[in-house]
Image (tube, rainbow, N blue to C red):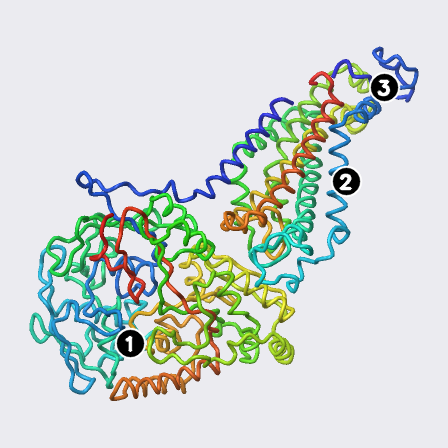
Amino acid sequence: MSNDPQAGPVQTVTAPSPPGKLKKEAKPASLWGDAFYDLRRRPMFILSVVLIAILLVMSFWPSLFTSVNPFDAKTCELATARQGPSAGHIFGRDSLGCDVYARAIFGARNSIVIGVSTTIITAVVGGLLGLVAGARGGAIDTISSRITEVFFAIPWILGALLITATFRSANLGIWIVVIALAVLAWPMTFRIMRAAVITARNQDFVVAARALGASQSRVMFRHLLPNAIAPVIVVSTINLGVFISAEAALSFLGVGVQSPDISWGLMIADARNRFLEAPLPLVFPAVFLSITVLAFIMLGDAVRDALDPKLR
Amino acid sequence: MRVTKGAQIVAGTALLALAVAACGGGGATTGNPASGGAGDTPVRMELGEPQNLLVPSNTTESEGAEVLAAVFEPLVNYDENKQVVLAAAESIESTDNKVYTIKLKPYTWQDGTPVEAQNYVDAWNYAANQDNAQGAGYFFGRVEGYADLNPGEGKQVTTKEMKGLKAVDNSTLQVTLTAPFSQFKTMLGYTAFYPLPKSAFGADGKVTQEYGEKPIGQGLFKLDKPYKKGTDQAIDLSVYDKFPAKKPTGWTKLQFKLYNSSETAYNDLQADNVDIHDSLPASAISSAKTALGDRYQDQPDAGVGYIGFPLKYSDEYKDVKVREAISMAIDRKTIAETVFTGTRSPADDFINPAIDGYRQGACQACQYNPTKAKEQYAAAKGPAKLELGYNADGGHKEWIEAAANNLRANLGVEVTVKPFEKFANILDDLDAKKYKGMFRMGWAIDYPSAENYLTPIFSTGAIKTGSNYAGYSNKEFDDTVAKGDQAATPEEGLKFYQQADDILIKDLPYIPVYFYRNNSGYSTKVKNVKINLLNQVEWADVEKA
């Protein structure tokens, strides 16, 4: 990070520091400005953003994509179970005679909601704790680091099974999945934030800010946070995809999203026994899931490359 | 940041491994192959975990009964025409249907001692005593003196014996009933009527834990080692040398492999990792026909599948109109055809067509009638939310989901489907009055008589001790069944049983959904597998292929 353009000014006055020597243009460059400039030119970024935009629209307005409401049991006709694609049902029907396409579309919402909420929770909780631990050091750092190590020692799938099974009776719906994943995933964000803050802590501009009498919180939020947040954003974006696939795994195992709610993992689990007879009800949710996870991981990779060119 | 990414790849792989493991599941739980001589590999059969320890009088579910049927020889068996044939009994005679004299064939216990009439007396007295809380105790309710052993909860049992049971000599047993019961002889084939050796009882007169883990019977197979419930994934047995009746040829070892999922067991069957699967999951049926060919069997079965209501502790379903509406909202025919691929038939009576007494179309409310169901449900102000529980280890998910969808679409209610990990869990929760929703229930007969669809499931007496999980109690029903029991001839008895059946159809404590057909399959390693009317394998006929 040492050759990053210095976003955090040395003085408390907001006079811009000289633009990075590497850039020839006259316009002032910042880490974010550079990153965005860089990103706009990457086909991978554009592709993933387009995919994610479609997914977001799909999860908030699924009715734009399908006129069938899969939550209405009337749309399922048991007598037509496992029929192949037809005019009204382009992906065919599942074992209960429900429209696979409509269910796959409506399944996006749970995946996105769970992925995004888990990411926000882990980024905020892990990020803040990591910031405090890294900036303060000492006992706070030691204790919180040990706590995260405890969480790291828990295999996530076992931990998630345990949490979802224990709180099943609380009827939290999909939020139980968010809680389980967030509880197990925040230490990762914590570690990354803490490491980045420790790197930034000893840099000249921070030392100078302290010397000029800036308060602890001012140093943390004005100087340390902006300089340490980039890796957290990258990891969170990639994790979003990982959380979505984790949700599908838990639903597949029967502890995540519960029927009659719709989830791709659940659809895959329901269709797997009859896979040889009727493969489509399994294939389509699996394809949706793969594309979604891929889109977020691609986005994360692109953001990482832009924010941290050294790793390219 | 490389470290992080690495961790993600690991996480991803772990996920994949898990998904694969979930498909392969129990494959890894292969029991240790029998240590017997070369070439004597066991015949392996799929089984769910028994609910209780292996004590005959406390085994009222199919999985434990399957094991016990291999270890014990019942007094009577049934032939293909559902007629009683004598097994461990030499003769069973009665002039008045009230006093029965049972002569025993000379059998020996698997520890070498001879089986005596007193062993039956001991076992039955133990089973009937309320202090021992045996699940099948009520089966002895017709024996004179049963009331003395069951004075009621909280009351002291003053005797240990039923007056009506007498060992006349070592090989003659005399049973006196409180009232004539024409079906008694038929009943004697049931698990609860197996004898127990003296060694089964501890110093306190109760059946010991050790015995429950390694029962000693007088049947075809003996257990090789104690079965530790919850940890063991297999039950190993071998043929008892001195068993006097027909023994299997060419093999001597039998292994029950415990599975949590019927689907996993089916995958193992295709891979020849298990030899006999007697309850193929619905989802496997269409592929089983092609994958197994001749090794797939579809035969009529006397079982009935129900959806039950917890009437004893939940008021939600108290109104019979609500139950009727729920019944009419379920499209049994399409479920039987699509979900079960034609391997079940839609139920229209409480008595299965395989048993005398069935009347086609007897249950009006079992006809699919969504319009009337909706009107009636709305008029009766049925609950807006319904819960439907099932056990996930028996291949029930699909039809339960289908039935739930029927209810959602036809009644306009919210339906939650609740899976229980094992059949034993749902039974335990019902026993403990913890579960308040509707539940899936099934009945595999104990003995081939119409009476068996009535007394053990719906009589008042069966609430506490039997399989009356609904908690249904109706005096008129109890009385009508009793009249049937006391009838002089089976034909006359049947008339009363049908009247009792009519009362059930009116009250619908359970709603009959389908009649079972038995869908079994066997591996390439065995042949001549026959499954009898009690859903048990005729072991002596099985041959190695």
Marked residue chain, label 1: B
Location of residue B414 with respect to A113 vertically, above or below:
below
Disc 3: which residue? A9
The location of residue A173, given as percent across then percent down, is 62, 53
Mark 2: amino acid: Ala
- At x 9%, y 76%, the residue is B168
Distance between the Cα atoms at labels 3 and 2? 36 Å
Q: Is the residue at mark 3 from the same chain as the one at mark 2?
A: yes
For the N terminus of chain A, the image quarter is: top right
Front one among A32 and B200? A32
Disc 2: which residue? A53
Location of residue A117 with respect to B418 vertically, above or below:
above
Secondary structure category for the residue under label 3: loop
Disc 1: which residue? B150
Mark 1: amino acid: Asn
Q: Earlier in the sequence, mark 3 or mark 2?
A: 3
The location of residue A9, given as percent across then percent down, is 85, 19
